[in-house]
Amino acid sequence: MTHRPNGRDPRAPGLAAFASLVADETRAACLLALLDGRAWTAGELARHAGVAASTLSEHLGRLVAGGLLAEERQGRHRYVRLADARAAQLVEDLAAQVAPARPRPRTLREAGAASAMARARTCYDHLAGRLGIALTDALTARGLLRQDTGFALTDAGVAWFAATGIGLERTGRRPLARACLDWTERRPHLAGVSGAALCRHAFDAGWCVRIGTERAVRLTPAGERAVSDLLGVGAAALE
Amino acid sequence: MTHRPNGRDPRAPGLAAFASLVADETRAACLLALLDGRAWTAGELARHAGVAASTLSEHLGRLVAGGLLAEERQGRHRYVRLADARAAQLVEDLAAQVAPARPRPRTLREAGAASAMARARTCYDHLAGRLGIALTDALTARGLLRQDTGFALTDAGVAWFAATGIGLERTGRRPLARACLDWTERRPHLAGVSGAALCRHAFDAGWCVRIGTERAVRLTPAGERAVSDLLGVGAAALE
DNA sequence: CTCATCCTTCGGCCGGCGCCGAAGTGTCCC
DNA sequence: GGGACACTTCGGCGCCGGCCGAAGGATGAG
């Protein structure tokens, strides 16, 4: 990088440096894995990505320095997670751009896992998969969310969250509602403060539970009743 | 790249490859330049970026192959522009993430240009700068746009566009309204179909004109009257 | 036709960086 | 204390890719 006396936009170096963080396959794999919203140890990520621990340590150093990851050291472990909702959104958005190169279930076990993921999963801090879309569509059909002129809760929507006992706390500048493009379905679903609150409530109220240690989620019988009663979402929309 | 038999997300290679497109300083400079929404020739971009024509030719090849740019060959010229609104949004979003490393006016001329850009400019196909924000805020204050629960036009807002004679044609899946984070102001302004329509109308109706060959824009006296009459935006909000 | 202009292709150079294994540091457990 | 474990640092290797200049189309002007 020699000196460039030109009319380049001063943001170019920063933009390139930032994109470089994602521009490595191993780091990209880490970021996608961390989209589950949990904190992983460096060792877990190294095994997941299939590289030596030393290699991964350097990658984590870069990602933390770049502000994409936050770290928390506990004893001899280094826990790492996406820095904030902003970072998560960035990875989501970027991942949504890439060609849906995904057909690849090799074994029955893999096919089952992929099917469960497509049905319901978490995407950072909100619900995704067909479940996430079904909820989003139901909110829209009931006039609680409008997607026709943008993406925002209606007054009735705000009231619905309050009546259902789901608190919506405004934190900083994070929007109350925003669209997150679903990877498997290529359709938008609810994210933002309300999406996160709905997801948290769904877990707290026992509407859904995690399947194994993955991002996949299963709707419980109680959850089926709840979404049917509250939003009129039938079992058909969830299969 | 040896074979990785691991549990990596299959999207990782694509994500990394895609980010690589932006992860080069010269390509980043091109993308930022193209955010003005116009078509540039390869030569113009080469001079702008300060690299040899041969070097830039290779960069353009990658960006086009990656789907970020669209090209149009006319005679011995190769015109290139951002492929679509999706690509523009991606570059905007990414650029908004990077630290606002921008203080740097060296000469009076540069300072003047920076000041004009901060006042009013285009951002791909919509208006940005203090003008863009003033319009967005005015729409919000008048109940035509709601930003409190997301980002969407209200029914009154749709009616306002119709009454003002600004057509809103739904094209594909592009949202009618979405927020674009302003680089200089760090605040959201109106983008999407309605943002583009408003910008186009402003030029067609003579509300504003381009300053020189840059992205900067100047509000005409007629434009000042129009925004004052239609939205109650005073001159103070635009300085 | 001839020349100038714009772009692309090719060969070659060089730096950056992703990778590993070995060695070192810090932490927890017994 | 000793040993196992998690992670980091370091040296070294190899490759990818950005850069240039020279040469080769392709197009338009005269």
Image: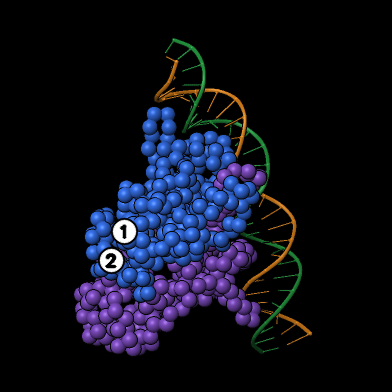
Chain colours: A purple, B blue, C green, D orange
Of the pair D4 and B27, the residue shown nearer to us: B27
Q: Quadrant of residue A105?
A: bottom left
Label 2 sits on what residue type?
A: Gly
Secondary structure category for the residue under label 2: helix
Q: CA separation, marks 1 and 2?
A: 10 Å
Of the pair B188 and A102, the residue shown nearer to us: B188
Q: Earlier in the sequence, mark 1 or mark 2?
A: 2
Subunit of label 2? B
- Give coordinates of residue B162: x percent, y percent: 23, 59
Q: Which mark is residue B194?
A: 1
Residue drawn at x 32%, y 81% is: A158
Given this view, does label 1 or label 2 mark the residue nearer the observer? 2
- Give coordinates of residue A84: x percent, y percent: 50, 72
Q: Residues within 10 Å of mark 2 (few under 14, many from 20)?
A: many
- Give coordinates of residue D29: x percent, y percent: 43, 20
Q: Which mark is residue B157?
A: 2
Q: Are marks 1 and 2 in contact (CB under 8 Å)?
A: yes
